Amino acid sequence: MEYNVHPLANGIRLLHVPSASAISHACIIINSGSRDEEEQQMGLAHFIEHLVFKRTEKRNTNQILTRLENVGADLNAYTTKEYTCIHASFLNPYLDRTLELFNDIVFHSIFPEDEMEKEKGVILDEITSYQDQPEEAINDDFEDMLFAGHPMGRNILGTPETVTALTQKDIHQFIKANYKTTEIVVAVFGNYSFNKLIKVGSKHFEAVPANYSDKKRIAPIANPMQSLTVKKQIMQAHCMLGTQSYSLHHPYKAGLLLLNNMLGGTGMSSILNLQLREKYGIAYTIETNYSPLSDTGIFALYFGTDKEKIEKATNLIFKEFKKFRENPLTEIQLQKAKNKFIGQIALGEENRMGLIIAMAKSLIDYNRIDDLETVFNKIRAVSTADMANIANEILDEQKLSSLIFYPAED
């Protein structure tokens, strides 16, 4: 896919992907997330993401929220362990309006005390809501197990205690330490010339003061396998298995993405879905997920089932894992898996917002953006020997931690 990159003098990069559509998609990605918080500041990155919509030097909350909605556009944001992202979809004539608003909320928010207190209440409700959804809560608790004692394991939302204690000083110190202009990308997918994007992007971001602060991240260490069962007032058991895995830069990343897709990826024909749901009917939801991060990764499996069926479900899962470890895939099996995965990636390109966000992240992570054919070639290059090695490293049940939310007795 065609794209162009223009670095501004302050280090912010402008990314443009041309399109013939009447609808544009834009995002500003900041390489800063919950793993960059101090322990007593848990939830701070997410708190800031909420607060940038509340008041700036020239706009109140209503003016921020209606600035794009008044022209039919959509504005939203999210925070992960490593990124903060603000994004918008809009009709092509409103590029200037969108990028001006991005600049205003990211670099000119004032974080007033009254808005901070109101938003703390909103986030406390959000935390409570997640706790009421065991399929969500177990994922956060499981990552805390995998990365015990490391910022990567902390809940993105924080805790009621840490969120309540956050201050304006915390916010300003965090932004100064982590919003490095060299790690910010403003990306636009739209029907504009590259020169126009440079003109509009420079207008709104060239004057942002350069921030070359020395942000330091400590890589997590591998923790020993753990197994934990927690009783909760729930009707169904919720279970997770997994381990720390390969980073974004590991040579086996493509292979594990492929293996993950075979086991429990998108679609109804994944191996574990066919076994546990279709053949035995013992799990409505079973899925695997591999999340490669800058210096580590997470491979995790989730399923929900009746408490009486946990053992059978787990045995079936481990049986499939053992097949991958002890019986290498044939070339025909591997080729079928590659064809399926490549097709899914190609179809995913239709999600234009997801595409531009992924490209902006790639620019931060690798300082490059691979075209589809390069991505496909990396998948095609995965060998049966690679898959066997990955299976023996990742799917070893002796190395997999587990967490079960178990229905408490009445």
Image: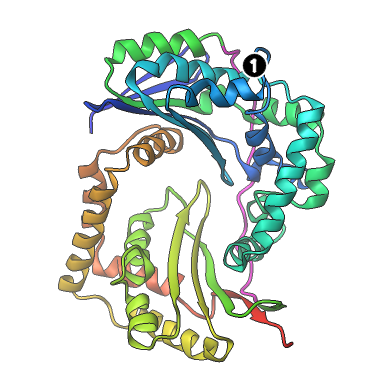
Q: Is residue 78 left or right of residue 129?
A: left
Q: Secondary structure at mark 1?
A: loop
Q: Residue at x 54, y 85 (%)?
A: 306
Magenta-colored stretch includes residue 210:
yes
**Residue 326: quadrant of the picture:** bottom left
Q: Is residue 409 left or right of residue 201?
A: right
Q: Residue at x 71, y 45 (%)?
A: 123
Q: Outermost residue, left direction?
A: 332
Q: Would you call the spot at circle 1 few (<14 residues within 10 Å), some (14-19), or many (20 or more)?
A: some
- On the image, numbered disc 1 is attached to which residue? 59
Q: Is residue 215 left or right of residue 260?
A: right
Q: Residue 203's x, y, as percent?
A: 46, 8
Image quarter (top left, top right, bottom left or bottom right) of the N terminus:
top left
| Magenta span | 208-227
Q: Is residue 39 left or right of residue 242?
A: right
**Residue 228: quadrant of the picture:** bottom right
Q: Residue 239's x, y, as percent?
A: 56, 76
Magenta-colored stretch includes residue 325:
no
Q: Can residue 315 be spotted in the picture? A: yes
Which residue occupies the foreground of this view, 195 or 399? 195
Q: Main secondary structure of the magenta part?
A: loop
Q: Can residue 83 be spotted in the picture? A: no
